[in-house]
Amino acid sequence: MTIAFCEHGLNRDDHARANPARLAELRLSPLARLLAMEGLNPVLGSDNALTWGDASGLTEVSEVVFLGLDGEAPLFAPIPAAGDTRPAYEQRPAWDALSLLPPRDLAIYGGARSLVDWHARHRFCANCGGPTQIAKGGWQRNCDACGAQHFPRTDPVAIMLVEHEGDLLLGRGTRFPERRYSALAGFIEPGESVEQGVAREVLEEVGVVVSDVGYIASQPWPFPSQLMLGCHGTAQGRELTIDETEIADARWFTRAEVATAMDAQVPGEDKSFLPPPPTAIAWHLLNWWLERG
Amino acid sequence: MTIAFCEHGLNRDDHARANPARLAELRLSPLARLLAMEGLNPVLGSDNALTWGDASGLTEVSEVVFLGLDGEAPLFAPIPAAGDTRPAYEQRPAWDALSLLPPRDLAIYGGARSLVDWHARHRFCANCGGPTQIAKGGWQRNCDACGAQHFPRTDPVAIMLVEHEGDLLLGRGTRFPERRYSALAGFIEPGESVEQGVAREVLEEVGVVVSDVGYIASQPWPFPSQLMLGCHGTAQGRELTIDETEIADARWFTRAEVATAMDAQVPGEDKSFLPPPPTAIAWHLLNWWLERG
């Protein structure tokens, strides 16, 4: 099963971004479409798909980004007045939409959301404080005052399955929905590799030394713009010293407990915990772990 | 062999960062040391190691970052007046230092450099244009005007070995030193996985369709703050359509050509190309490929 948010299949057409004349052509194309959004939330149709509006009013100074080409159709998305950096499950309309959207629409929405949210929170130059202008069809902002160029952020996050003698370590974020446990995760910092970030985060959060870190899979996560790097590692012991400033709880789960929790996606009283939703890479990581046997 | 920039072995001590009283204690410790830098360049000692100065003059408002603990010794680095986003080989003093520094010092310098360069280029709030203040010992900046929090950037970059029937695809950046070829690379964009980023970049740069993308290893690269994600993939064909706005050249190399080029680190007339330096993850990727056989 494809990991959510990954397969929008649009042609990003990097050349068009850098060519103002070509961008103008695309804006004026009768095939051009504008993603319907209310702020950062998608406006769903009766079929729970994304809805698209007429793009004929777009001009060179419109607050929009060029998402790419869907076949011959240029797709655009509007930049909202304000961004939102809260976790997904605290943004109810968007969070609910994630479970409704068809996979391809989910991927289009995710990529669009990351980009327009970045614009909404980066209208000024971090280097000099001056106002910045959209450039490259929304894939850059430029500062006329100091000449600095700014690019959309993508923040790498390590998310990891930690195993000890056949059991799996899962934790609860301080703001998680009730009974949910998932893979531990944390931002990769300047000056460390993915593998080091995995080991550091696990040591910080639960006091466990991890070795033999390996990579499994990745996923873009648009709240606001993470690149989730799914990994696994082996714990050198099972005693947990939980850092309660970072997580609410962490526990070792048996293979049977994980298998039962993953068996259906609705919460049930017979499950030992509520697993991450199928839109999260953590769900795929748990399946990978169960299938590896 | 350890990948360069990865193993500084400092305790990053995330709790100290968030604790102003503890940070003050660390600044005032007689063991505290301040990295000697001229702008963004390290000041090397006669042994080509980093040099460290007295930290006793540091105050709460000093323009420094807390790197972490070296045993009991708190290490700090100064924020320069200006940052520098040029590629490494266009920054001669820093580039030359890379090949001289012992591995651990190289890793300490790399992490410090990424962080202080980010501060130098992010003194203002991207959300509102107001001035920002250093927070969390240099691992955050806060805006008093709008309340936005800003975090150091780490930009994920895919760097990939593309193979076809035993030959390897390598390219030349438009600003590469003469005769150097290396792995193709490009920034991961919002809304794509690492694996998709690899396929997109190769298609954009040389017009080749890549499948079966796998991950090899990662490296932090401090010019200015990339997270290099080393991957491999299989080309579906060998005809190259080079995008000259992105790269200067790309070629297929035989295993024998790569082995000869990697045999010594000094350029020689008998080599088909000059390989990437041992400080680059590309050098490790080429060795991985040769050893895999």
Image: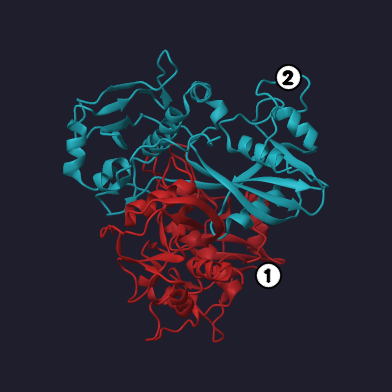
Chain colours: A red, B cyan
If the image is split into quadrants, where does the C terminus of chain B sit? top right
**Dot 1 surroundings within 10 Å: few (below 14), some, or many (20 or more)?**
some
Q: Position of residue A197 (x, y in %)?
A: 43, 49
Number of numbered callouts drawn: 2
Q: Is the Cβ of the residue at disc 2 closer than 8 Å to that at disc 1?
A: no
Q: Could you tell me which chain the residue with mark 2 belongs to?
A: B
* Residue B285 in which image quadrant: top right
Q: Position of residue A160 (x, y in %)?
A: 46, 59
Helix or strand or loop: what does disc 1 sit on?
loop
Q: Amino acid at mark 2?
A: Gly
Q: Could you tell me which chain the residue with mark 1 belongs to?
A: A
Which residue lies most toward the top here? B46
Q: Position of residue A159 (x, y in %)?
A: 46, 59
User: Quick check: B147 above or below A285?
Assistant: above
Q: Amino acid at mark 1?
A: Leu
Residue located 83% across and 47% down the image: B239
Which residue has dot 1 on it?
A31
Is B75 situated left or right of A273 in this image?
Answer: left
Nearer to us in this view, B257 or B36: B257
Which residue has dot 2 on it?
B268
Residue located 40% across and 86% down the image: A268
Mark 2 or 1: in front is 2
